[in-house]
Amino acid sequence: MSLDFSTALSLMAIGMITVFVVLLLVVITGKVLTRLVNWLDKGAEDAAIAPVKVAVISAAVEVFTEGKGHITKIDKE
């Protein structure tokens, strides 16, 4: 019975280590891809938001908050 138990424990350990390594690779790949896309998309920061869109957003915030809200920054996504 102890041989079966040790085989089960080693199989469980190998499985858990495999899952941990795969998830670690997913996280690292995601971070690298995010940094790469942000680095390649530097030109989008220079593009300004059209004044008409800013006016529409300001009017919507004014109506929704009944004059209590103020826009401090608009990020283009």
Image (cartoon, rainbow, N blue to C red):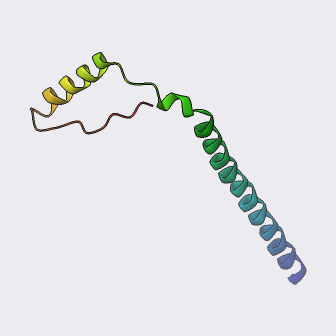
Instruction: Choose top left, top right, bottom left or bottom right for residue 52.
Output: top left
**Image quadrant occupied by the N terminus:** bottom right
Q: Is residue 54 left or right of residue 62?
A: right
Image check: 63 left or right of 1? Answer: left
**The residue positioned farthest toward the bottom in the image shown:** 2
Residue at x 74% of width, y 55% of height: 22
On screen, residue 34 above or below 18: above
Residue 63 placed where, x, y %?
Answer: 13, 26
* Total tally of numbered discs in the picture: 0
- Image position of 7 with respect to 45: above or below: below
Give me the residue at 9% from left, 32% from top. 66
77 vs 18, left or right, is left
On the image, the x and y values in percent for residue 55 come to: 23, 21
Relative to 32, residue 41 above or below: above
Quarter-of-image position of residue 14: bottom right
- In depth, the one of 24 and 48 nearer the eye is 48
Residue 14 relative to residue 67: left or right: right
The residue under the point 61% across, 44% down is 35
* Residue 6: image location, x then y, percent: 85, 78
Decide: is 33 above or below 50. below
Q: Identify the residue at horizontal 24%, vertical 20% (top origin).
A: 56
Q: Residue furthest right?
A: 3
- Report the quarter where the C terminus lies: top left
Work out which residue is located at the far top of the displayed protein and give it: 52
| Residue 24, quarter of picture | bottom right
